Amino acid sequence: QKSFRISSERMAKVRAAFEAFRLDDEGTLATMKAIHAETGKLVDPHSAIGIAAARARRKDPNVPMVCVATAHPAKFPDAVEKATGIRPSLPSRLADIMQRPERCEEIRWNLDALKDYIRSVVKVAA
């Protein structure tokens, strides 16, 4: 039936450990604009949503909050320009990105296959 049940006790533990947040396009652009006004930094839409979520859900202002950017603003030039009036350009190290070969690996839809692939490409410190 593609559904499952969680006991109220387990659900309480999930809710204690996780929080959710959503932001529509208008809110995302407003956050991007505010971040630029506050800091002079340009952020991509996904990072802006993360920052807005962190600000909205932060329980203790004395505890530092770290938000890791998920993409360069130049990946979303139209959105950044719409929010800030600035069209970001790619950093020089990425100027040729559209000419670089694309790399893609197909992996069977299987957890063990995924683990095997990760082990084959990642060197794990002993």
Image (tube, grey):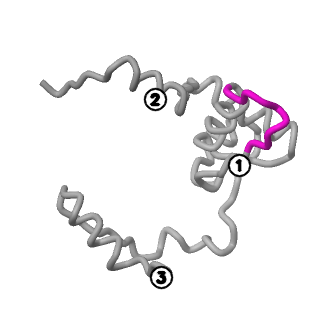
Sequence-earlier tag: 3 or 1: 1
- Where 101 sits versus 15, above or below? below
Query: What SS does tag 1 mark?
Result: loop
CA gap between label 3 and label 2 equals 32 Å
Q: Which mark is residue 14?
A: 2
- Where 54 sits versus 69, above or below? above
Query: Picture quarter containing residue 107?
Result: bottom left
CA gap between label 1 and label 2 equals 41 Å
Which residue position holds label 3? 126
Q: Give the image location of residue 4, x and y in percent.
A: 23, 25
Per the rendered image, the range of residues in magenta is: 57-65
Residue at figure coordinates x 26%, y 72% from the top left: 116
Q: What's the amino acid at mark 2?
A: Val
Which residue position holds label 1? 87
Sequence-earlier tag: 1 or 2: 2
Query: Picture quarter containing residue 103?
Result: bottom left
Near-viewer residue (60 or 27)? 60
Residue at figure coordinates x 80%, y 48% from the top left: 41
- Where 21 sits versus 101, above or below? above
The local crowd at label 3, few if under 14, some if 14 to 19, many if 20 or more residues have their Cα within 10 Å, is few
- Where 10 sits versus 85, above or below? above
Residue furthest to the top in view is: 8
